[in-house]
Amino acid sequence: MARINPLRTAAFRMTLIQASLFAVLVAVLLGIAWWSVSEYAEAQLRANVKTDMASLLQAAADGTLDRQIQQRVAVMPLGPDYYLLADAQGRRIAGNLRYRPTATGWRTVPLQGALGEDNTDADEVHLYATRLPDGRWLIAGSDNRSVVELSELLSRRFLEIGVSALLLVLLTGGIGGWLYMRRIDALGELAERALEGEADFIIARSGKDDEFDRLADRLHRMLTRMHVLMDGMRQVSSDIAHDLRTPLMRMRQRLEAGSDPHTDEARLRDSVQRALAEVDDLLATFRALLRIASVESRQRRSGFEKLNLSALFDALAETYRPVAEDLGQHLSADIDANQHLRGDQALLAQMLANLIENALHHTPAGSRIHLDLQGRAGRLVGRVTDSGPGIPAGDRERVLRRFVRLDSSRSTPGSGLGLALVSAVADLHGIQLSLRDAQPGLVVELSFPLAA
């Protein structure tokens, strides 16, 4: 079997789609996280500025404001904290900030550095301005270098996490796709072996009851049915060769005898009539074979409809009751009313008719035949029971095959296809067919699927 290119498999395409969706999801989640952290850092920055402003206002009340600002600027002249004490016109008195205040409250302005000098990544400063009782301006602020540095750190870490996660998804998806391909290849190899004619293999389940186990079950049933049908075709070919050879030979002998120039007209006419009877029997046999093949192809399922099975049983019982009386037999029926089923009415009628006719033809005079249909405990079961000689246990499965006739029935007319058609119709409708001993006689049980 040709090897599959992993890059052109559905598993690989699904992995790429999952990786793409995961990348988008990670990008969205990391963006939300980055925005949340940045907002929190900025809120903390302003909280620190408010704390500084409270401390400076206390120093202004104590008369030590100028000294406090000078001390803080001396410790950190280039930020990140900025202070400005200006006169009423906004001219700087003390501090490390180049800014001319115009209004009180919060302001976010571009950073010009501490007195114009800036060697950081900060690009803006958050300021809080207020006016002292003597009219002077007091401003405290902090630049956003910590926020910028945190953003850069988060961006690097998020990029590393995203790339790692993406690689992990691709790796796990690739491993998952490889495992899927292995199991699919195993099932495909078994299918190839089946196509090559091998029959002795088992499609093993993993025991996980997953989709592959369900696929293995369906494939096993399909291949099993395919082999059954192939065996049936071989059997039919063999059976036709054996069972039809005798009537063909008889017909040839009769025609050959009739072609003798010394044969009188009466004998010639008799030979032709017997040959025509043999031809009619052969044609009936082929019609039965074609009907069985049509049923087994399951094409008739398209014509399924809901039907009254009880009415069908009643109609057949009424039809065959006088026939049984003419043969010296007794046919009785016990049928539950209003039992329904989805199926092909013509085929179901043919199936039941074949069972009743088998019971009539293969039981002696005085036999009793009983037809019943019972719906009990969630089951719908039909039976055809007779009090005749029955069928030995070892032959009950065999008689459902084509052209099988027991020694006891060789003297009666027929081709051995009646029960084969019954089996085909039962299989088409999902009916469980079983043959059991009626002590005495035979009971054919039909367990119908309940109508939805």
Image (cartoon, rainbow, N blue to C red):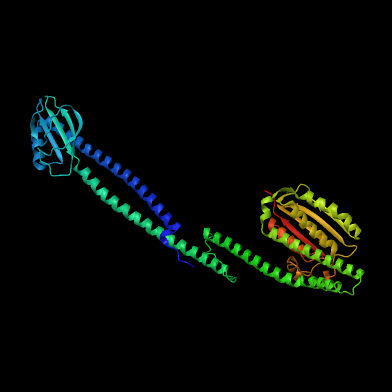
Q: Quarter of the image holding residue 44? A: top left
Can the viewer see residue 354? yes
> Which residue is located at x 77 percent, y 64 percent?
285
Q: Is residue 126 left or right of residue 397?
A: left
Reply above or below: 33 against 369: above
Q: Position of residue 133 (x, y in %)?
A: 13, 24
Can the viewer see residue 434? no
Q: Position of residue 120 (x, y in %)?
A: 15, 44
Reply above or below: 47 against 353: above
The residue nearer to you, when weighing 266 against 250, is 266
> Which residue is located at x 23 percent, y 47 percent?
152
Q: Is residue 187 left or right of residue 252?
A: left
The residue nearer to you, when weighing 202 against 248, is 248
Reply above or below: 399 against 12: below
The residue nearer to you, when weighing 419 against 251, is 251
Q: Position of residue 309 (x, y in %)?
A: 76, 50
Q: How many callouts does the rendering have?
A: 0
Q: Is residue 69 left or right of residue 256?
A: left
Q: Position of residue 4 (x, y in %)?
A: 45, 63
> Which residue is located at x 55 percent, y 62 percent?
216
Q: Is residue 274 left or right of residue 401?
A: right
